[in-house]
Amino acid sequence: MFSKACEYAIRAVLFISQKSKDGKKVGIREIAKGIDSPEHFIAKILQDLRRKGLVQSQKGPAGGFYLDKESMNYSLADVVRVVDGDSLFSGCGLGLKQCSEKKPCPLHHTFKQIRGDIYHMLESAKLGEFNKQLEKNVLFLKGE
Amino acid sequence: MFSKACEYAIRAVLFISQKSKDGKKVGIREIAKGIDSPEHFIAKILQDLRRKGLVQSQKGPAGGFYLDKESMNYSLADVVRVVDGDSLFSGCGLGLKQCSEKKPCPLHHTFKQIRGDIYHMLESAKLGEFNKQLEKNVLFLKGE
DNA sequence: TGAATAAAAGACTTTTTTGTCTTTTATTTT
DNA sequence: AAAATAAAAGACAAAAAAGTCTTTTATTCA
Ligand code: FES
Ligand code: FES
């Protein structure tokens, strides 16, 4: 459904959100541990997200990644678009060159609905909204 | 969502279904053209499906791929399971090692629903059921 | 039986994705 | 200013997915 890079991206962004909610910054090593991902791999992904303005960062001692007020209101759909593009939101489920009403694939009518549900799920999930549940250990960003 | 191999597989199986509905067999070249896929690539995928019994084939002149009565009742979910495994049906959307109620990821509750919808869409879609619409050119297996 | 046909099998290449390592740049603190 | 810290950048490697090519095997038909 998502690429590995995108899965890591979402988990990282939610991790940063929770850790940085009272102005703190969080380093790449802590992020990698917190979401159980390869350190340098998630680092590169976060650089992309920073260039697009979805997360902020600061170099040097006491530096790290964080989310400002605005970024808290980005949605997971924004993250997905940066990392995986928008084929998940608009592409054909069976891989036809383009999804269209004029030449629909056999799954089109059902799939369109589901694709919309996915979009709605991601669009309505703002980065800041899971903070409390993550802190209470009611939601998790890594397994075991 | 699906791998390329799986997209081709679904399209191929529906193509075979439609072409073979009155006992005819269809060759790999015609299939590849009919669904706009690489010939040898889809050939290999169909070999897997044949070993699992989802499609039938016959070598030699006038041979080719076809679906028998039983195979017509397989579902797209069966095809997906053979080609992509069942992670789409049971895996965590954010890539946690396992999806569970005990340690749910932030998307778990919403995603579980969507995953179920996908499963239902694929499980209820039997291989034979698109034949008429494909023949009438109301549904399509390739773009442009 | 022999030629033609078509799938099966397997080796191989290319591309994409994922992951690692090293060097550079910016920032802070002493 | 110097040392320490942490992200940024970029080169590189490994693995997986996608795609290609050649040879073999089974079947039919003349
Ligand atoms: S054409 Fe396939 S999903 Fe719309
Ligand atoms: S734990 Fe992530 S979908 Fe269930």
Image (cartoon, coloured by chain):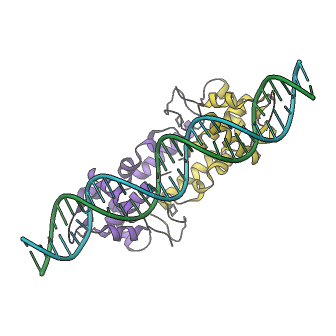
Chain colours: A yellow, B purple, C cyan, D green
Q: Is residue B34 above or below residue A123?
A: below
Q: Is residue D13 left or right of residue B74?
A: right
Q: Residue at x 60, y 26 (%)?
A: A138
Count of labels in the image: 0
Rendered image quadrant of residue A91:
bottom right
How far across and down, in percent of the image, does residue B103 sit? 54, 27
Q: Is residue B98 above or below residue A4?
A: above
Q: Is residue B131 left or right of residue A74?
A: left
Q: Is residue B12 left or right of residue A6?
A: left
How far across and down, in percent of the image, does residue B4 sit? 46, 56
Residue A103 or C10: which is nearer the viewer? C10
Q: Kindly tell me whether residue A125 is visible in this rendering.
A: no
Q: Residue at x 64, y 48 (%)?
A: A83
Q: Residue at x 54, y 68 (%)?
A: A101
Q: Kindly tell me whether residue A83 is visible in this rendering.
A: yes
Residue D22 or A52: which is nearer the viewer? D22
Q: Is residue A123 above or below residue A58?
A: below
How far across and down, in percent of the image, does residue A6 sit? 60, 44
Q: Is residue A89 left or right of residue B8?
A: right
Rendered image quadrant of residue A23:
top right
How far across and down, in percent of the image, does residue B43 sit? 34, 61
